[in-house]
Image: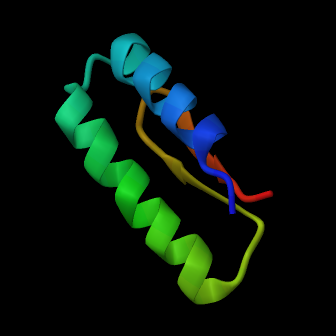
Amino acid sequence: MNFAILRKQVKYRAVTTGICVSVARSLAASLKMQLCSEKKSRIGIEMGRGTRLLALAE
């Protein structure tokens, strides 16, 4: 699985939503684990204010 897209999006979302980068990184890590455990190729969570954090697996 390639999570480069996720990492890039996390950094961007951390700025746009005002959450700190460390929080964004921990969210990214939990999404990665969820992708692996549920064997899904795509998963997303709502982060408030209509912003979504999306993890994609290739």
Q: Residue at x 55, y 87 (%)?
A: 37
Indicate the quadrant containing the N terminus: top left, top right, bottom left or bottom right.
bottom right
Find residue 43 and report its image quarter: bottom right
- From the viewer's side, name the closer residue of 52 and 5: 5
Instruction: Give the percent coordinates (x, y) of residue 57.
Output: 73, 59
Front-lying residue, 41 or 45: 41
Q: Is residue 9 above or below residue 3?
A: above
Question: In the figure, is residue 18 to the left or right of 46?
Answer: left
Quadrant in the rendering for residue 13: top left
Residue at 55 percent across and 29 percent down: it is 9
Q: Can residue 51 be spotted in the picture?
A: no
Quadrant assignment, res 58: bottom right
Q: Position of residue 32 (x, y in %)?
A: 50, 64
User: Depth check: 45 or 35 in front?
Assistant: 35
Q: Toward the viewer: 49 or 33?
A: 33
Tell me where residue 54 appears, x and y as whole percent. 62, 45
Residue at x-position 42% and y-position 40%: 47
